[in-house]
Amino acid sequence: MRAQFRRTAMCGVVLVTALGTGCATTRPEDDPVQVKLNDLDTRVARIERIISNQSLVDLAQHLDQVQGDVRQLRGRIEELEYNNESAKKQQRDLYNDLDKRINALSRGGGAGGAGAGAGGGFDGSAGAAGGAGAASGSAAASGSTGSASGSATSSGGSTAPGGLADASNSGANSEEQTVYAQSFDALKAGSYSVAITGFKSFLSSYPSSPLAENAQYWLGEAYYVTRDFDSATGAFRNVLQKYPNSRKVPDALLKLGFTQLEQKKVGEGRATLQQVVQKYPGTDAAKLASERLQRAPAPAK
């Protein structure tokens, strides 16, 4: 009985040993499940690297685009700064031009404008606006306002009215002279919005006044110096249409040409200035128109 039990035990030990040896011979890396897990890990790692590399590429491209946009913005800012400075200088020239002409008119009456005009100003407008009004001595004599004396005409061809002396000699009544003088004083003081309102009110209240043609012209000048070129165009055209025999017509036609050039209407502006040269030869207006035509850009083809 004891011998039989011993044999049974030995068989059990041998069996257990054999099973243990068989399990030990199967390596973990050869396990199918483990192989699949390792393969998945490898694939996931590869995908992560691809995604990471693509993100870097996208980021670099985006950065390049942003840098390009910044360069364009800087260039645009520099261009705007230059244009702004040019506009400021142009505005100062306009104010200085109008101030010279008004002071000349105040000092010397109608003939005083010639000195300011000959001295320069923006786009040569001083001479035209301040004193290129007369096409001839007869035109100076036919004006209802301003100085019509021979000395005024001979002092450079200027007969542009506008000063207080012109108002007192115009034949207008005292009320008209007072209202006109207030508007003109505002223009001299640089209160352009007040001057614009005053001249408009004068034209509305006294459309038949001998000073109306002057008020209409200086209204256009006030618009021009404040760069309201659309309103300036209308004001100068009104001088030409409502007062065709006025000695302000050459001035108004000249400044209409300047205004059209400012509006980038090169073809119209050049044509208007050529009319000044052809219709009023020998005048300051014609001279300034010729000078401006030489500087004006060629019309687009």
Image (cartoon, grey):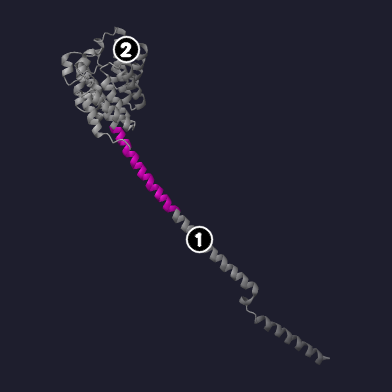
Q: Amino acid at mark 2?
A: Val
Side of 108 where 18 appears, left or right: right
Q: Position of residue 296 (x, y in %)?
A: 27, 34
- The answer to whether marks 2 and 1 mark residues whose Cβ atoms lie closer than 8 Å is no
Residue bearing the label numbered 2: 179
> Which stretch appears magenta?
62-89
Q: Position of residue 123 (x, y in %)?
A: 25, 30
What residue appears at the point 70 percent right and 85 percent down from the top-left corner? 18
- Going by the image, does 243 lie left or right of 6? left
Look at the image and tell me in which quarter the C terminus lies. Answer: top left
Say what secondary structure mark 1 lies in: helix
State the image coordinates of residue 95 (x, y, percent, origin top left).
27, 26
Distance from label 2 to label 1 (Cα)?
81 Å
Residue sitting at the far top? 173
Tell which tag, 2 or 1, sits nearer the viewer.
2
Choose between 101 and 70: the one closer to the eye. 101
Check residue 253 in the rendering and tell me which mark sits there, or answer none.
Answer: none
Disc 1 target residue? 52
| Magenta stretch: includes residue 205 | no
Q: Which quadrant holds the N terminus?
A: bottom right
